[in-house]
Image (cartoon, helix red, strand yellow):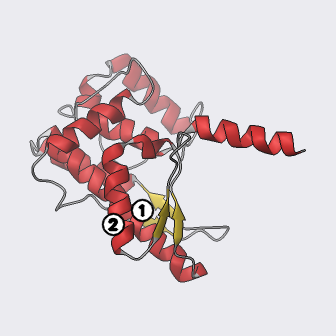
């Protein structure tokens, strides 16, 4: 919320769940930058959306908030037709970077307007899928490649995976996805072992 410029409104579930003393500590940390480590993890964005929408403030196990958010998105009968939008920021040193700030602002706006969590979840999933399609198109424009390999823990989300595979297929991409190994850190660890074994 801080990075996205969203005020700590008292009606946002994430603010309600955070005791005043912790909010004061966070404000000092954000103001000074002490103890603040940026992340590029899509999983943390799922956690943030779940917290803002009032779905989960704490978790008992890895990806719990994302799993519950996926279930809510599946239950929504509307929402996919109004996906949240990311901004792409050009990077001089590499590929474009997706900015999640606009999504956080859109989620906060919807929460304050009383939009149900299931619709927020559906809009978020649709937005992430649209982002992946947009990044794939940018990559194809730059490289001419039309084969996409999907990897990362976010693709354990079956709803997102189905949506992305369908969308990329319609866009003319050949989609590769893990079948024998998990797309998350488990598959990464095996790849590291294979490389280490090869010397």
Residue 89: horizontal and vertical position, in percent?
Answer: 49, 67
Q: Residues within 10 Å of mark 2 (few under 14, many from 20)?
A: some
Residue 77: horizontal and vertical position, in percent?
Answer: 9, 49
Q: Residue at x 31, y 25 (%)?
A: 57
- Upstream in sequence: badge 1 or badge 2: 1
Q: Quadrant of residue 173?
A: bottom left
Question: Does residue 32 appear to the left or right of 50 in the view shown?
Answer: right
Instruction: Give the residue number, with chain letter if any, for mark 2.
Output: 167
Give the Cα distance between marks 1 and 2. 9 Å
Question: Does residue 102 appear to the left or right of 142 in the view shown?
Answer: left
* Quadrant location, the C terminus: top right
Q: Residue at x 45, y 39 (%)?
A: 44
Marks 1 and 2 close (CB-CB < 8 Å) = yes
Q: Residues within 10 Å of mark 1 (few under 14, many from 20)?
A: some
Q: Residue at x 37, y 41 (%)?
A: 46
Q: Is residue 52 visible?
A: no
Image mark for residue 59: none
Image mark for residue 132: 1
**Closer to us: 132 or 26:** 132
Residue 53: horizontal and vertical position, in percent?
Answer: 23, 37
Q: Is residue 161 visible?
A: yes
Q: Secondary structure at mark 2?
A: helix
Tally of marks: 2
Q: Residue at x 45, y 40 (%)?
A: 43
User: Is 119 situated above or below 94?
Assistant: above
Question: Residue at the right extreme?
Answer: 199
* Quadrant location, the N terminus: top left
Residue 132: horizontal and vertical position, in percent?
Answer: 42, 62
Q: Quadrant of residue 131?
A: bottom left
């Amino acid at each position: 919320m801080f990075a996205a410029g969203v005020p700590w409104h008292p009606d946002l579930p994430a603010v309600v769940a955070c005791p005043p003393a912790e909010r004061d500590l966070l404000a000092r940390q954000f103001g000074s930058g002490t103890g603040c480590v940026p992340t590029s993890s899509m999983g943390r964005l799922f956690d943030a959306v779940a917290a803002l929408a009032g779905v989960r403030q704490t978790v008992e196990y890895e990806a719990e908030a994302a799993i519950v958010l996926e279930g809510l998105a599946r239950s929504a009968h509307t929402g996919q037709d109004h996906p949240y939008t990311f901004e792409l920021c050009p990077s001089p040193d590499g590929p474009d970077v997706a900015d999640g700030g606009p999504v956080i602002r859109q989620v906060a706006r919807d929460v304050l307007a009383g939009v149900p969590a299931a619709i927020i979840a559906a809009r978020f999933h649709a937005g992430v899928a649209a982002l992946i399609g947009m990044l794939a198109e940018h990559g194809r424009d730059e490289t001419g490649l039309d084969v996409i390999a999907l990897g990362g823990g976010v693709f354990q989300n079956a709803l997102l995976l189905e949506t992305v595979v369908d969308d990329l297929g319609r866009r003319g991409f050949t989609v590769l996805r893990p079948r024998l190994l998990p797309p998350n850190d488990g598959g990464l660890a095996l790849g590291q072992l294979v490389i280490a074994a090869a010397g």
